[in-house]
Image (cartoon, grey):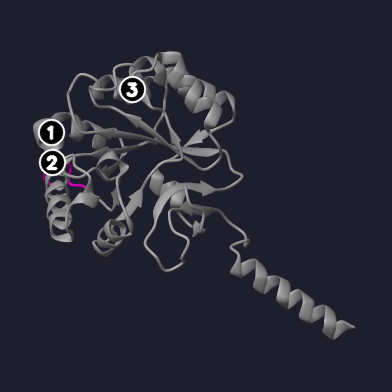
Amino acid sequence: MKSIRRWLMSALAACLVAFGCGIGPQVSAASTQPNQPKAIYKVDTKEKVVALTFDISWGNKVPEPVLNVLKQQNVKKATFFLSGPWTLHHPEIAKKIKDMGYEIGNHGNLHKDFSNYPDSWIREQVALSEKSIYQVTGVKTKLIRTPNGDFNPRVLRCLNNMGYTVIQWNTDSLDWKNPGVQNIVSRVTKRVVPGDIILMHASDSSKQIVEALPQIITQLRNQGYQFVTVSELLAGAKVSSNVR
């Protein structure tokens, strides 16, 4: 009987490992094959932590007010994905993001869908934006959010081969559609889950985010959430095979 129990325990442990049921957070990723390239959507965890992320590719009217809101709300952890041209055109704001201690990721160079172009074009575009961000901020980017969130397995493979982790989102604020402040707030606070990556924009096209952001932060805190960077969210996580 003892040998049978030992065998059953060993088999159960093997199943837990095989199906990703081990201890610790897991990353929800856009791939069903363990060795395939992945885009990260969220971390599966019971801890009430989320990553606020902001894409910036255009304008100088919204970024600094967003930074001011984060400062006023004492949010010390957030991740900004910057495009290369925007960074070069607004170096003082990009430096401020870095100096405030926020994480910086790559948002590409030209704001075009990567899947429509060959790998050589993707590598060139990412290298250009990487160079621009480094030139201005001194940050060597390792995280990327593709323009429009566009990718396919080939694009993911290309970016992974460049050393990048592709970051998507689990909760989309849809702030760029300017649907109304309360609609933005409600969409985020009702959809959020532990380990979430929340998509927002600090580009001038997002005309209502500055007013919505304080309410989002307050309501998430009231729900017990704490804010971390994307890298902190991913630290120590294991990749699962969930598809979004």
**Which type of secondary structure does the marked residue at label 1 adopt?**
helix
Please say if the residues under marks 1 and 2 sit with CB atoms less than 8 Å apart. yes
Quarter of the figure with the N terminus: bottom right
Which residue in the rendered view is the most extreme toward the front? 116
Q: Earlier in the sequence, mark 1 or mark 2?
A: 1
- Look at mark 3 in the image and give the residue it sits on: 177
For label 2, the crowd category at 10 Å Cα-Cα, with few meaning under 14, some 14 to 19 and many 20 or more, is some
Point 11% across, 45% down: residue: 135
Q: Quadrant of residue 47?
A: top right
Going by the image, does 240 lie left or right of 108? right
Residue 233's spot in the image, x, y percent? 46, 47
x, y percent for residue 2: 87, 83
Looking at the image, residue 228 lies above or below residue 24: above
Q: Are marks 3 and 1 in contact (CB under 8 Å)?
A: no
Question: Upstream in the sequence, badge 3 or badge 2?
Answer: 2
Q: Which residue is mark 1?
A: 91
The residue carrying mark 2 is 136
Three-letter amino acid code of the residue under disc 2: Val
Mark 3 vs mark 2: in front: 3
Q: Name the side, left or right, on which 109 lies relative to 26.
A: left
Residue 35 is situated, as x and y percent measured from the top left of the image, at 42, 69
Tell me whether the residue at label 3 lies in contact with that at label 2, contact meaning CB atoms closer than 8 angstroms: no
Q: Is residue 136 left or right of residue 199?
A: left
Separation (CA) of disc 3 from disc 2:
30 Å
State the separation of the CA atoms marked 1 and 2. Answer: 6 Å
